[in-house]
Image: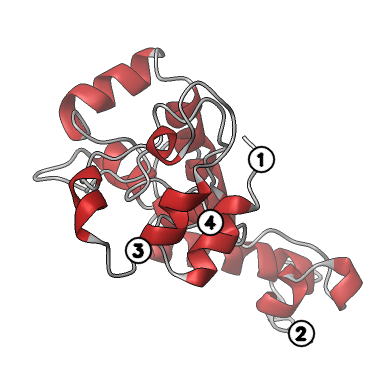
Amino acid sequence: MSCFLGPKTICKKIMAIMSDYWWKSNTTSKGMHWRSWESLCSPKDKGGLGFKDLEAFNTALLGKQLWRVITQPDSLLARIFKSRYFRSSDPLNAPLGTRPSYAWRSIHSAQHLIKQGAKVIIGNCENTNIWRERWLGSSPASPITQTSTVPEPIRHLLSMDMKVADLMMPCRREWNSNLINSIFPEGTRRKILSIHP
């Protein structure tokens, strides 16, 4: 389950076997299911018994593999997947691709889960693209999606490859507030200026 996405039918069959084991007193009796399996899978503090929902557990394990590919880019698995599926991208934003292997399709299915909590922490700002990376806000973090009407004298500064470092004062660790105020709307400005690199 940590390598491949289990088919929903198999997960349901396993959960049915677990449910039968829980409710039946022996193999010949039919047994009465007093509560639904979903309610048993809910946490103990919410009235359940904390059993694992196998589909969610499978997605969480695949998310862990995706996280390893992101955080350990020199591992053999990450290098193989990079050469095949995300040469010019990163694992978190990589498309599924054409004719993907079952292993990549499985790990790719956990992208939405990781994206909900992933955020780029701003350090030296030189590698973070302001338009593609999730670096603003917290739950969930997001890239910059809009600009104000940019004045003509500074319009040449904008590009699709613009890095967060381009929004900072040269040779210092503080924001170029004049540039930020002239490019971005109020909500985005507040989010940027609240970050301390």
Task: Give the CA separation, mark 2 to mark 4.
Answer: 38 Å
Query: In the image, residue 62 lies at what x, y percent?
Result: 47, 43
Q: Is residue 147 visible?
A: yes
Q: Is residue 83 left or right of residue 131?
A: left
Between 113 and 195, the residue placed more toward the observer is 195
Cα distance in 3D space between marks 4 and 3: 12 Å
Which residue type carries mark 1? His
State the separation of the CA atoms marked 1 and 4. Answer: 16 Å
- Tell me the amino acid under the disc marked 2: Arg
Q: Residue at x 20, y 34 (%)?
A: 85
Residues at marks 1 and 3, CA–CA distance in whole angstroms:
21 Å
Image coordinates for residue 188, horizontal then vertical, percent: 49, 63
Does any portion of residue 14 appear in the rendered image?
Answer: no
Image disc number at residue 196:
1
Sequence-wise first label, 1 or 4: 4
Could you tell me residue 12's position as x and y percent? 50, 67
According to the picture, the residue beneath numbered tag 3 turns out to be 145
Q: Residue furthest front?
A: 153
Q: Amino acid at mark 4?
A: Ala
Read off the residue under disc 2: 35
Q: Residue at x 77, y 67 (%)?
A: 22
Q: Nearer the viewer, mark 3 or mark 2?
A: 3
Q: Is residue 110 above or below residue 129?
A: below
Kindly give the residue lying farthest to the right in the view shown.
45
